[in-house]
Amino acid sequence: MEIRDFQHLKHFPGTEGNPFDRVLRRLNELQELPWPLFSLIILILAWVPSYLQPWRAAGLFAFFLLDWAMLAALPRAGVSFGPPRPVVLYLALLRLPFAFLPIPYALALQIIGTLLVIYAFWIEPHRLTLTRQRLTTPKLNGTLRVLHLGDLHLERITRRERLLNRWIADLKPDLILFSGDILNLSYVEDPTAIRQAREVIAEWKAPLGTFFVSGSEAVDLAHVFPGLVEGLPLTWLDNRSVTLQTHAGELDIIGLTCSHRPFRDAPVLEELAARSNGHLNILLYHSPDLAPNASRLGIDLQLSGHTHGGQVRLPFIGPLFTASLYGRVFASGRYQIGDFTLYITRGIGMEGKAAPRVRFLCPPEIILWEIGPADVK
């Protein structure tokens, strides 16, 4: 795959001040509007497709209010903890085009919309899935079980995090690798979120250890992250590599701090990769955007996240947005470039600020890798 040069860009994904970040922060201000004023805004929207018929406007407004009630109930139920009003406005705008249809069709589609809201906001974000992957290599003489986690984005401990830790205990991996983003963007300096994130991570135990890299600089803040991981049973790889002696042979883990600027991070990777000495090597890097560079440096496996798989995927279309410099080329799942393998996790948590706490056809995942020679199970 061709390496692209992004030095001309002014803004990069995962950094403060990029267009996506600015939009989220500005829309987050909708939450501060007095509820009567916000109610008036969505009532005016309900009148737009009403053909000046009050009963039609009232019906659509009722669906808007139902969305509002369901989203406002999410934090009370301990499901997710985002601001409801910006998302109510998004949903209202999505509902509007269907409200112009004749009543039977409009009503049916609005009901379907409500069912989709229930599923995408209440159910799928907690439908944690286990993905199993196999990587064959002559560089090991036995099989290693490696668990890849990414994008925890913790707001508060929910049933998703409790299920996650039960699965980790049951799977008993040899090694745990985390590819960045511990806290949710809305809670990057929140003491309760920090304390509860530490509680979750403290339970991640594996015989060969747990290794971390930090994620996006807007999420894993430079002045917060060291204290967040201090004293936990893990090893933070901040632009360094470690060699592990395992029952299957030697393994190098390269941990690279992600600036989201491949032209800045690639030289650091080149230096670290040169020290591998022919061992199997795994690169932990938050974004997939360094994969074209890594594929030319003898890296065997890159484990990344950041994209969340888009969180919302449409049939035949795929993700609407991935926050990757390469667009939708890197979304989620496994990619093969010659002997180089890239895996992008859909992540565990969700985006923050005014972004909807939603997943559709893109459930959270953890990935269990079995890595070893072809003739060993």
Image (cartoon, grey):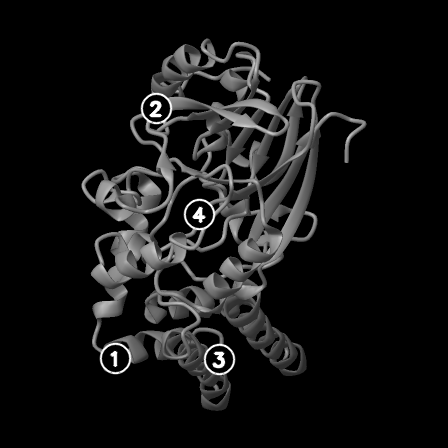
Q: At x 48% / y 69%, what residue is drawn?
A: 159
In the orientation shown, which residue stands out farthest toward the left?
Answer: 223
Residue 151 numbered tag: 4
In percent of width and height, residue 219 lies at: 31, 45
Quarter placement of the C terminus: top right
The residue nearer to you, when weighing 143 against 165, is 143
In percent of width and height, residue 351 lies at: 40, 53
Residue 50 numbered tag: 3
CA distance for labels 2 and 4 = 19 Å
Q: Residues within 10 Å of mark 1 (few under 14, many from 20)?
A: few
CA distance for labels 1 and 3 = 23 Å
Amino acid found under the numbered disc labelled 2: Asn
Residue at the spot of label 1: 35
Amino acid found under the numbered disc labelled 4: Asp
Is disc 1 in contact with disc 4, using a CB cutoff of under 8 Å? no
In percent of width and height, residue 255 lies at: 41, 27
